[in-house]
Amino acid sequence: MNKQSHRGRKAAAGAVAALSSLLLAACGTADAAGTAKEAAAREAACAPYAAYRGHEGTTVTLLMNDGFESVKATQALRRFSDCTSIRVDVEGAAGVEDEVKKRVGAGDPPDLAIVAQPGLIATLAGSGNLKPAAGSVAKAAGENWSADWLTYGSVDGELYAIPFDSNVSSYVWYSPAALKKEGYEVPRSWDELMAVSAKIADTGRTPWCLGLGSGAATGWPATNWIEDAMLAMYGPDVYDQWVTHAIPFDDPKVLRAAERAERVVKNEKYVRGGVRNAATTYFEDAGLPILRGECSFYRLGSFYAGSFPRGTKVAADGDVFAFPVPPADPSEGRLAIVGSTFTGAFSDRPEVAAVHTYLATGDFASRRVSLGGWMSANNKVDMSLYKSDLDKLSAEIMRDPDTTVRFDGSDMMPAAVGTGSFWTGMTDWIKGEDTETVLAEIEKSWP
């Protein structure tokens, strides 16, 4: 090899090395730019969660119903966890209320739990196990719910638990096509509903489906009939007096409310399959005959939409839909019995307060609503996120300031009554026990 050739090869090698360095530098610059861009995008996406930071590496447990709901809650909380580095372990249980009692008794409560009964909230708060809502929780809740909704999670004027999901109980299910074919319109008053029921019965068909069966909770669907009547006949003040036992359970007003319900639920000409059989007909199955034209109406809450077979169109122009239980007088406005679950804290650790506060926001409620199968009375939720006609109607009812809303009465009563003697009393009532005896027995059970 001559010197000139050697020098040429050295020059070429140097050029290659220089080019490689330039390429590596360029790639490094591009990678750095990409990383910086990604970091900026992440920071922008996480900016709404800045107030919840400062608890990185912590874990908060959230106990709730198992299955679909726990899966969707985990999805709705994902962005929060990614941005705050607070791990939220969603624990599912088949019976949350029983699981809460069990774990509290064993001295191992979850950090947060979602329960359905204000009566249980009061019991847990009274025992000192449930903690008062942190200031940040109360502030967020006050901005996003009406005062009425917050009273259901309060004890002696202090907020303990915030609403989670909500539902409208006061619905009557029907077939829009069948009602139209028979020449009827959706009833606007209770008297109109009774008139349509009578006309259907006169043709030899049974206008109503009814089912009280629910395992250990058998009887609860009939409590809704009494609650509807108490609110419609006497208004919210008397309803509240009844729920809080300011008037006894066997008061003449309650008797008259039960007699209104009797016109349907204890009328052999009205109830498909007979009144006594309704006591053992499982509530989830009871309304399905509407699809076959074997009954025209079934009174149950908005959640019942999920009980119809896959492919059933639930809409005003669909296979089935629901209308609100009509008031006694349409000019007095709409009435609604509602239900909800509530999130309460058993720990006052700061990371628990952070998660609890986030659950009170419109951001969480909107994320969960967008996943479907869930409603909220949170007034920050964009109504366009609701995917079904029924969910939209329910959300409108819950947020309408002109609708008289009251919480499910049995859930507000002491457990010995609301989830005890009221349920069993309604079952005995449907099986044939006279109304006065049933009401007197429930009254005796009030603690």
Image (tube, rainbow, N blue to C red):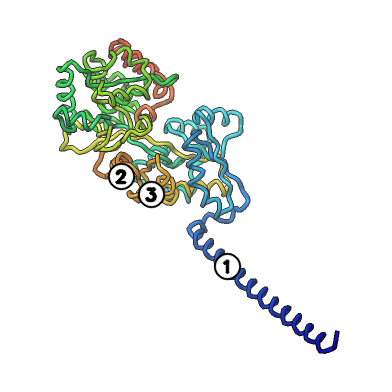
Label 3 is placed on what type of residue? Asn
Q: Alpha carbon of mark 2 to alpha carbon of mark 3: how far?
A: 11 Å
Element assignment for label 2: helix
- Which one is in front in this view, the residue at disc 2 or the one at disc 1? 1
Say which quadrant the C terminus sits in. Answer: top left
> Residue 212: which quarter of the image?
top left
Circle on res. 144: 3
* Res. 89 in view: yes
Q: Alpha carbon of mark 2 to alpha carbon of mark 1: how far?
A: 45 Å
Q: Earlier in the sequence, mark 1 or mark 3?
A: 1
Label 2 is placed on what type of residue? Arg
**Relative to residue 234, is residue 421 drawn left or right?**
right
> Looking at the picture, how far across and down is residue 96, in whole percent?
50, 31
Residue receiving disc 1: 34
**Relative to residue 57, is residue 310 drawn left or right?**
left
Residues under numbered marks 2 and 3 in contact, where contact means CB atoms less than 8 Å apart: no
Q: Residue furthest bottom?
A: 4
Density class for disc 2 (Cα within 10 Å; few <14, some 14-19, many ≥20) is some
Residue receiving disc 2: 399
Element assignment for label 1: helix
Residue 77 vertical placement versus 264 (above, below): below
Q: Alpha carbon of mark 1 to alpha carbon of mark 3: how far?
A: 39 Å
Viewer-proximal residue, 59 or 233? 59
Viewer-proximal residue, 50 or 306? 306
> Looking at the picture, how far across and down is residue 140, in whole percent?
43, 50
Q: Earlier in the sequence, mark 2 or mark 1?
A: 1
